[in-house]
Image: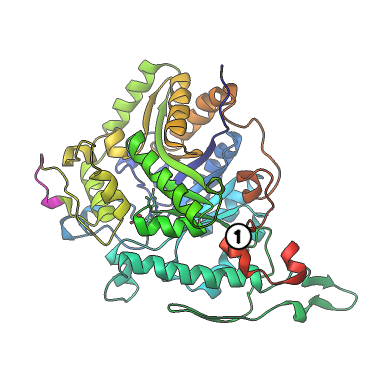
Amino acid sequence: MSRHRELLLNAFQMAAPGHTWAGLWRHPRDASAAYNSLDYWVSLARTAERGLFDGVFLADVIGQYDVYGGSAETALARAAQAPNLDPFLLVPAMAQATHHLGFGVTANLTYEHPFTFTRRVSTLDQLTGGRVGWNIVTGYLESGARGMGLAEARAHDVRYEAGEDFLEAAYKLWEGSWEAGAVLRDAESGVFSDPARVHRVRHEGPYYRVDGRHLSEPSPQRSPVLYQAGTSSRGRLFAARHAEAIFLNGHSKAVAARAVRSIREAARAAGRDPRDIRMFLGATVIVAPTRAEALDLRDEYARYLDAQGQYALVSGWTGIDLAGLRPDEPLAYQATNAMQSLVENLTAPGERPFTLADFAEFGPRGARAPFIVGSPSEVADALIDWAEAADIDGFNLTRVVAPETLEAFVDLVVPELQARGAFKTAYREGTLREKLFPGAGPHLKASHPGAAYRVPGRSAAS
Ligand SMILES: Cc1cc2nc3c(=O)[nH]c(=O)nc-3n(C[C@H](O)[C@H](O)[C@H](O)COP(=O)(O)O)c2cc1C
């Protein structure tokens, strides 16, 4: 049997009763309505670590899905990512219950300030011993902007420009404020931190201003592992500069491969090694000991999918009100202020156009990503096929019925992948960055733009 490169795996979750498959919370064996209990998260983290997963990836959204039918009614009734909780606050409990598991936490920078946000991330990186990643997002819901007291959301490309400014300020704080060795903790002299080695950051950007020292001492990774999701043409430029890992979707190998290729090309053009970006593809996996059992499980789950909830989600993601689409009318490309890369994927030339029925399909088109059903060996083969065809490094495994879909994956698919040499058999030591990039140090690589903000001298070697 040929050996494959080791895949990376994240459990893709959200602190909400409904994630990307609306309605599954009603399944009698589903526990996701307990999303507001620590037991749910601790148990999930333990399962993921038992399966040697690289991380739990937590989505988040600011705002409600009120594009569908022009109202939030469907989203609220059908639990389309509402209600939800702040994902940051779940992490310490999960970290306490695990040793190696990483945490990719989504945070929308548009509604944060670098001075306080960098402290929040440093706190988590300290408490987890360097296991934190930040999924950098900028928001796609107008309702979020209104909730924050703004008349309207920033325009799509402006959001990315503001993101550049935010990151510059954040790098200065994480990388350039505290020198390595600035913290003495010297009880004898009574000096905790050496003031001469804690530098004041002055940032005067078009969107953000900072004048102050980073509030926290350096955490194991300083800057967290930087995730990004969003692969429109502007999104790719942003990703090529900043991302160390990218989360993308694609309902066909061709669509996913195209996105990966274009990001790797953009990274090369930005002077980075394209292999310094780990590509995670979203995937839904339904596995059982035999193919027949897996197909039965799929049919059983499908009965709980809530079409209205799916329409509310897709309308919010795309910015296109699906209530205006006739049942057999194909979705046509339009420029929107939401997820442009999703609209591009759904209307990709050469692909069968999407209709309403597709969005409510419990299958690859409803997933807009790999949807794999089968026996353990069939699933393992399919994952490896996808990874090779689309040149991706790993998968973000979508929640279907929690916790059983994740448990089934851990018990049945992980051993198959390991037998093929396509998954690790033990964790490596080190921070999340060191685990994702064997041989790398805990901090941003020197070729990453954030590394340029390090304080010269002793900290450069840190
Ligand atoms: C696979 C995927 C996952 C995403 N997850 C989130 C999320 O959890 N929260 C969020 O606010 N935006 C999320 N986004 C939205 C992106 O961050 C981005 O705002 C959006 O895709 C628009 O950028 P684009 O047009 O470049 O794709 C996600 C996008 C993709 C493609």
Q: Left or right of 90: which side holds 213?
A: right
Q: Looking at this view, is 264 or 396 the one in front?
A: 264
Residue at figure coordinates x 31%, y 76% from the top left: 150
The answer to whether residue 60 of the structure is visible from this angle is: no
Residue at figure coordinates x 29%, y 42% from the top left: 23
Where residue 19 appears, as percent x and y from the top left, is: 36, 47
Q: Left or right of 93: which side holds 227?
A: left
Residue at figure coordinates x 47%, y 78% from the top left: 208
Q: Say which amino acid is labelled 1.
A: Leu
Residue at figure coordinates x 22%, y 41% from the top left: 307
Quick check: is 326 in the magenta stretch?
yes
Q: Looking at this view, is 274 or 411 the one in front?
A: 274
What's the colour scheme?
Answer: rainbow
Placement of the C terminus among the 4 image quadrants: bottom right
Q: Left or right of 357: which side holds 22?
A: right
Placement of the N terminus among the 4 image quadrants: top right
Res. 172 image quadrant: bottom right
The answer to whether residue 255 of the structure is visible from this angle is: yes
Most distant residue in the right direction: 188
Q: Residue tagged by mark 1?
A: 124
Please report the bounds of the magenta region as a residue range.
323-328
> With respect to residue 118, does 371 lie above or below?
above
Where residue 74 appears, as percent x and y from the top left, is: 21, 53
Ligand 1 is in which quadrant of the figure? bottom left
> With respect to residue 10, does 203 lie above or below?
below
- Under tag 1, what secondary structure? helix
Quick check: is 142 in the magenta stretch?
no
Task: Estimate how packed mark 1 is, as few (under 14), some (14 to 19) or many (20 or more) residues with alpha carbons within 10 Å.
Answer: many
> With respect to residue 243, does 384 lie above or below?
above
Where residue 434 appears, as percent x and y from the top left, is: 66, 48
Where residue 81 appears, as percent x and y from the top left, is: 34, 52
